[in-house]
Image: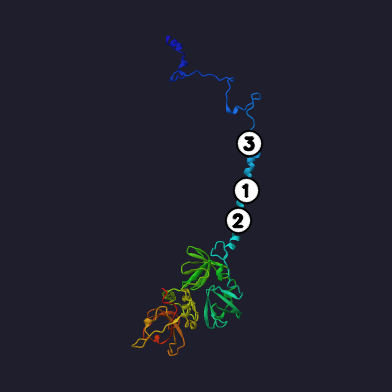
Amino acid sequence: MKRREKTTESGGIFKIFEPKKKPQVGGELPTKTIRHLERPVNLPFLKDMDEDKEQYGSAEDMEEKWGLSAKQANLGGVKKRKIVSLAIAIAAFILLIVGVFYILPRVLPDLFKGTNIELFVEPVINLEFEDESYRVVKESTIALMTEPDPASARIAEVLYNEPVKYVSPAKDGYCKIETADGISGFVKESSLVKDKNSIEPDLHQYKLIVSDPSKNVMTHASNGTLIKKVMMNTVLYADIKREGVYQVALPGGDSGWIGSSGVIELSPREETEEVSSRYFVSSVLTFVNSRYIQNGMSINGASVNGIVYVCAEVNGIRIPRTMEEQAKAGTEIVPEPDAVTGKIMVDQILPGDILFLSNPKDPNDKKIYEMAVCTDTGTLFMLSPARTTLKLRNFSSGDAICERIVTIRRLFSSKVI
C-alpha cells in the first residue's frame, strides 16, 4: 500500500510515457507566442492592396511591362500558335520531299548536261537492232546451211543469243539469214525470235562472255532447273549480280541465272582485251577429243576452224569463222629452213600459231585442205586421220606434215604477256 501511494505522488503511472525533455544548450528557449491578426505583416507584393476594398494588387499592363500583345498574354493564343507552328513544319517537310524526289531529278539533268558529272543524268540509250529485219537465235547452236535442206553442206554455226538479219523466207520451215560478219545461209525459222531486248547493250548493266566450253542457264540462282546449255563465246547481258551468279536476259523476254565462274564480265559496250597466246592455247585444249562436225564450233561437235574462231574471240582477237578467211588473218610466219637439211625447224613454230595444210594425198597442191593449231613445240591440235575427232599430234622437222604447210598465221602479238 505504501508503494502505490509513492507512485501516485510522483505523477502517476502515465508519467513514464511522457517525452523526455532535451537538454537546453545556451539557456532556456523563449516561450512561443501566437501571432494575432492585429499585427500586420508587410510583404512586397501586398503594397498595391487597396485597404478599403481588400483586393490584391491592380492589373498590370502586359504590353508596357513585358512587351506582350493581348493575344500573347492570353493563354488561348498559345494553343493557336502551336497549331500554326505544327502546320508550317508539316508544309515544309512536304515541300522538302517534293523537292528531293520530284523537282531535283527533273532539274539537275539539264544543269549537268555536257559535263562529266553523272549524278541524276539519265543514261543515253542507243538501240542497235531497231530494224525489224533482225532476229535472235534461241538455240544453243544452229547450223548455217547452203540450202534450205538439212542434208546440204554446213557453212558455219551460229550461237545462242546471236543477232542475225532475216533476209527472206524459204520452204519447209527454213529461212535465209545473214550473220553479223556477213555470212549468208539457211536456218530453221523456228530457231529464231523477234524480241531483241536480250541483245541491246544499253538496256542492261553487264555484258557476259562464256569462256568455258559450256555453261548452264538455270531457272533459279540455286536448285533451279536447266533452261539452256550455252557454248563458249556466247554473249549474254545481265541486270542483276549476286555472289557467284548473274541474272541474264534471254531471247523471247525471259530471264535465267548463270554462274560467275567461266564467264568474262564486261561493261555493256566493252570488248575483250587481247591476252597472250598461252590463254588461247589453253582454250583450244579444252576441245581435245571432241566430236568432229563440219564447220562446228561447240563442245557438242566442232571443227578446227570453229574452235579457232570461238577461242580467239574469247581471248580478245576478232577473226572470221571460215577456214578460207582465217588463212588471211593475223601475221604470216615464214620459218627459215635448216642450213644443212633444208627442212623447216619446228622450234620456229610457236604455241598459238595456226598452220594451214594441203591435202595429204597431194602435198604439191597448195590449196588449203585443213588446218591445225600449235599447242606446244612439236605438238598440233588437228583433225584425226579418221576424221571423227579432234586430237593432239606430235610432229618434228622432216615430218610429212611439214611438207604440207601452205601458210602459217600468228594471231596473237608476242608483246602481250
Above/below status of 92 relative to 236 = above
Above/below status of 395 relative to 27 = below
- Front residue (pair 111, 380): 111
Give SS at disc 3: helix
| Residue 34 at x, y percent in the picture | 55, 19
Q: Tell me the amino acid under the disc marked 3.
A: Glu
Give SS at disc 1: helix
Q: Earlier in the sequence, mark 3 or mark 1?
A: 3
Asked whether the viewer can see residue 173, the reply is no
Which residue ends up furthest to the left in the rendered image?
340
Which residue ends up furthest to the front in the rendered image?
64
Mark pair 2, 3: CA separation: 44 Å
Would you name the residue on which mark 3 appears? 64
Q: Earlier in the sequence, mark 2 or mark 3?
A: 3
- Front residue (pair 86, 136): 86
Q: Tell me the amino acid under the disc marked 1.
A: Ile
Would you name the residue on which mark 1 appears? 88
10 Å crowding of disc 1: few (<14), some (14-19), many (20+): few
| Residue 255 at x, y percent in the picture | 55, 67
Answer with the quarter of the image where residue 82 lies: top right
The reply to whether callout 2 and callout 3 are in contact (CB within 8 Å) is no
Label at residue 99: 2
10 Å crowding of disc 3: few (<14), some (14-19), many (20+): few
Mark pair 3, 1: CA separation: 30 Å
10 Å crowding of disc 2: few (<14), some (14-19), many (20+): some
Mark pair 1, 2: CA separation: 16 Å
| Residue 306 at x, y percent in the picture | 48, 79
Q: Tell me the amino acid under the disc marked 2.
A: Gly
Give SS at disc 2: helix
